[in-house]
Each structure stands twice: as structure tokens, then as C-alpha cells.
Image (cartoon, helix red, strand yellow):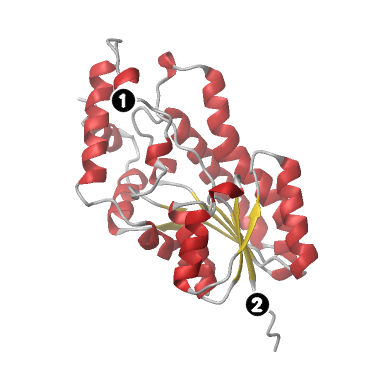
Amino acid sequence: MSTTPRTVLITGTSSGIGLAAAVAAARAGWRTIATLRDTTRSEALRKAATEAGVDLDIRRLDVTDEASVAAAVDGVIADYGRLDAVINNAGAGHLGTLENEAVADVRTVMEVNFFGVLNVSKAALPHLRATGGRLITVTSVGGVIGQPFNEAYCAAKFAVEGYMESLAPVARTLGVSVSVVEPGAVATEFVNNLGFDLEADIDEGPYSDALRHYIDRTVERFLDGSAQTPAAAAEAVMEALTADRPAFRIQTSAWARAFVGTKLADVDGSAVQDLTAAWVD
């Protein structure tokens, strides 16, 4: 029986779910390649690894740059000879609505959250085929239910979910398992990195009242203690990584399961519209 450690590459590990998943995977005995776009931002990751008593192989990977992706994946194969799993976690938040933003902004959101996932997955798949590996993507409940003022972000996550749901049976014919992990509210730096200035961006325009209602509701949810910790959300990622037969769609909490369930049972869309309309009115 081989004693070679299984190797997992994780994107977006500077903070939040990616950081927690990298530490959890290393603690579970996986050789963990923790990647991030800017390696100067790895201090929190290194500190968490030290505190957990685990070793991480920290490398640069910019999911929007095909050359960077290829270099990272090729480097893992050159150094370790195998790739058993990939966790697509890198992503960028975005808040806005169509009339108030440039279509170029929407393209940028898609580039990171959708095409970035495809770049990494395409580079990794030949190696995952060789090991009968796993392709795991952290999406969002926003990849199932469209949310006010998150049109671009949800569109990107919807695209990821549709792509992976379509790819899963194809990949399975060659021994590769495909899963998506759907967090709800998670207390991470992700929310702080939306690039949104509350006072500057809520003006007297036609959407100002609705946007303020949405912001108040969202801030309350992140401040009232109902948001998950990154470590709790990462437990679902580890389920996708280690379960004998992981489900295709895995939510990170009971709240996320109930929320996603609303959409999956909502044939005509009225239940979701009633739910999300209350967030802005």
C-alpha cells in the first residue's frame, strides 16, 4: 500500500474559508499547496499553520492569469508527481446594480469568480484523471438564489454551479468527483473586500432606499452572530474532500440548506421573489 501523501491545491487561502480549509486539510494528513494571488499577504496563513502545528506549501497563483495557473499546477506535479484534489476557493465580492455600474465591472467579476475557476480546473483535470481525484469549488448560496444588489456576483456563481453540475457526470466517467460547496453568511474578510463605500455609494439615486434597506439587513446579519466562522464553513469543504462518496451540492450550515431548499422547491419563482423583496423594502 502506497504511503505517498495525497496532494491538494487550494486557491484563495490568504484568509477566510480558504485559509481554514488549508489548515484543516494539512491537519488531516494531506500535502497542502496553499495558493494566493499575492504572497506578501500570507502572514495570517503562516501564523495559522504554525499555531496548528502543520506544514503548508505556500505558492503564488492568480486564477485570472492562465500562465500563473499553469506554472502553479506544473510546479506541483514537478515537485510531488501527483495532484489528488483541487479546491477552487478564490473569489471576489461585488455589490452594485446594473444602472449604476459599468458592464466592464460585471466582466471583471465574471473573470475572477467564473473564468478563474475554469482556468484552474482545466489545468488540473488531466492530473485529477490520473489519480481519480476530486474537483471541489466553493460557490455560495448566491449561486442558487439571486440576491438584490448582487447581480454580477450571483451571475458568476450561478455560472459556476451550472458549469460544474454539467461537468460532474462527464468527469465521473473518468473517475473524477466534482462537488460544489455553498456557504451562507461567513464572518470573513470577503465582506470587507467588496470595494463598496457605504456613504459614498448610497446616494439620492432611484435605488438609494432599496440599497440602504439591503445594507442594513446585511450588516445586521453579519453583526448578530448568525454568520458562520470560516472554520465551521471549512468543515463542509473537508466533507467534499474526504467523504467516500461526496454529494455534488454541499451546504455549510442548516441555514444554508434551508435557504437553498427554498429555491429548489420554488418552481415558479414566487417564493424566492417574496423572500428577497423583503430585503430591499
- Judged from the image, the secondary structure of the residue bearing numbered disc 1 is helix
The residue lying toward the viewer, choosing from 30 and 58, is: 58
Q: Is residue 254 left or right of residue 92?
A: left
Q: Is residue 214 left or right of residue 36?
A: left
Q: CA distance from mark 2 to mark 1?
A: 47 Å
Seen at 49% across and 40% down, the residue is 157
The location of residue 241, given as percent across then percent down, is: 53, 67
The location of residue 176, given as percent across then percent down, is: 65, 63
The location of residue 204, given as percent across then percent down, is: 27, 10
Q: Is residue 49 visible?
A: yes
Seen at 80% across and 64% down, the residue is 78
The residue that mark 1 highlights is: 198
Vertical arrangement, residue 117 with respect to residue 208, above or below: below
Residue 99 lies in quadrant: top left
Seen at 32% across and 41% down, the residue is 266
- Specify the amino acid type for callout 1: Leu
The residue that mark 2 highlights is: 5
Q: Is residue 246 visible?
A: no
Query: Which quadrant, please, contains the N terminus?
Result: bottom right
